[in-house]
Image (cartoon, helix red, strand yellow):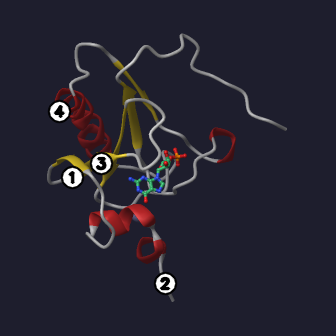
Amino acid sequence: MASDVDDCLFCKIVRGEIPAAIVYQDDYVIAFDDITPQAPVHTLIIPRTHYADMNDDIPAESLAALYSAVPRVAQVKGIAESGYRTIVNTGPDANQTVLHLHVHVIGGRSLAHGMVIFGGE
Ligand code: 5GP
Ligand code: ZN
């Protein structure tokens, strides 16, 4: 029976089975551009290890590795000085669509002051 990891889109990117525009990588994380960017810069950072979301009992060192990559990605993408927003969607109310933990790094233009836009229903 196929496991979550076999079927997971982002695990397939980690294994090199589907292509991605890689921005940064180290022993713990891979960062690649979002396929449907919502800003001039929209990069995703994922742990190489599969965790479904923030509720998935993630070891502190894995979270440290994930967030340590944020300023590195910002530097590579040229938005360290201009600024950026980091977002982690978790679960249905946040509209998480890919169940492999990921940090969105979004920037390259001025973003709205408010962070929360309510959806339908
Ligand atoms: P979520 O909604 O789960 O927080 O974010 C998932 C993100 O993954 C979305 O912004 C979506 O555009 C992106 N995404 C979905 N499939 C792919 C893919 O195959 N390649 C890349 N690079 N991004 C993807
Ligand atoms: Zn995965």
The residue where tag 3 is placed is 32
Identify the amino acid type marked 4: Val
Foreground pick, 47 / 104:
104
Q: Is mark 3 within 8 Å of ligand 1?
A: yes
Q: Nearer the viewer, mark 1 or mark 4?
A: 4
Above or below for 120 versus 4: above
Mark 2 or 4 closer to N-term?
2
- Disc 2 crowd rating (10 Å Cα; few below 14, some 14-19, many 20+) is few
Q: Amino acid at mark 2?
A: Ala
Q: State the image coordinates of residue 101 (x, y, percent, origin top left).
A: 43, 50
In the foreground, 91 or 77: 77
Mark 3 to mark 4 CA distance (whole Å): 11 Å
Vertical side of 42 occupied by 46: above or below: below
Where, by quadrant of the figure, is residue 112 drawn?
top right
Q: Nearer the viewer, mark 2 or mark 3?
A: 3
Q: Quarter holding the C terminus?
A: top right
